[in-house]
Amino acid sequence: MVHIRCTERLRKRLRLAPLPKVPSQGLLLSEWHANVITVDKFPLVLAVEDRTRLSLVVRARDLPRLPQRLASALHDLLIRLGVAEEMALGYAARMTELTWSASTDRSVLGTMNDFASLLKWLGAQGSRPSLEDMMDYLADVPTGPIGMDSPGQFTVAAIRFDPKAN
């Protein structure tokens, strides 16, 4: 099971009641913080994984289908990072069964704000980057909480050593 820790902005867009703070399970790619951001006048959902800082970006429309769209984005991103198809499918399948909770980690929220600023900058460069381009860009950004490693490389290394890998 996956926890999506919503900011207040996303919680209100999802029309959810106030959410509890749930402790971490400690499973790889199972704890995400998510927010609604605007890039080049388009509302998007930015989800950042707590441990690896891997980021997913999807359009902020059809929010009832958000779990399926996040799962699809995770699968495709893992494949682009070089993760085996079977493993990518396993991690993505977990995301379709999720629970909503309140955001809890200021460090992840800080990373999310940094990534949102980078995406806004990227969108202001003149060319409209695709969602895949945005996710690939964020997967390569050196990030302090993971020792200035890139989230993509850090995630691939973590998957290699994940005892619960499918």
Image (cartoon, rainbow, N blue to C red):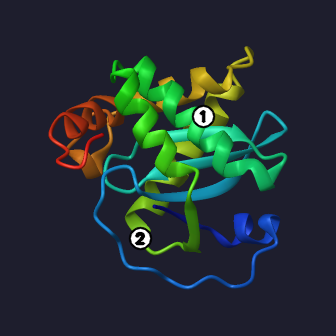
| Tag shown at residue 105 | 2
Q: Amino acid at mark 2?
A: Asp
Q: Could you say which is closer to the camera, residue 138 or residue 125?
A: 138
- Point out residue 112 in the picture as x, y percentages from the top left corner: 51, 52
| Tag shown at residue 72 | 1
Q: CA distance from mark 2 to mark 1?
A: 25 Å
Q: Could you say which is closer to the camera, residue 84 or residue 45?
A: 84
- Point out residue 54 in the picture as x, y percentages from the top left corner: 41, 41
Question: Are the residues tagged 2 and 1 within 8 Å (C-beta)?
Answer: no
Q: Is residue 67 above or below residue 79?
A: below
| Tag shown at residue 1 | none
Q: On the rendered image, what quadrant is the N terminus found in?
A: bottom left
Residue drawn at the location 56% of the way across and 85% of the way down: 20
Residue 147 figure quarter: top left
Q: Could you say which is closer to the camera, residue 145 or residue 85?
A: 85
Q: Amino acid at mark 1?
A: Ser
In this picture, residue 31 sits left or right of residue 18: left
Q: Is residue 128 above or below residue 77?
A: above
Residue 107 figure quarter: bottom left
Residue drawn at the location 60% of the way across and 23% of the way down: 132
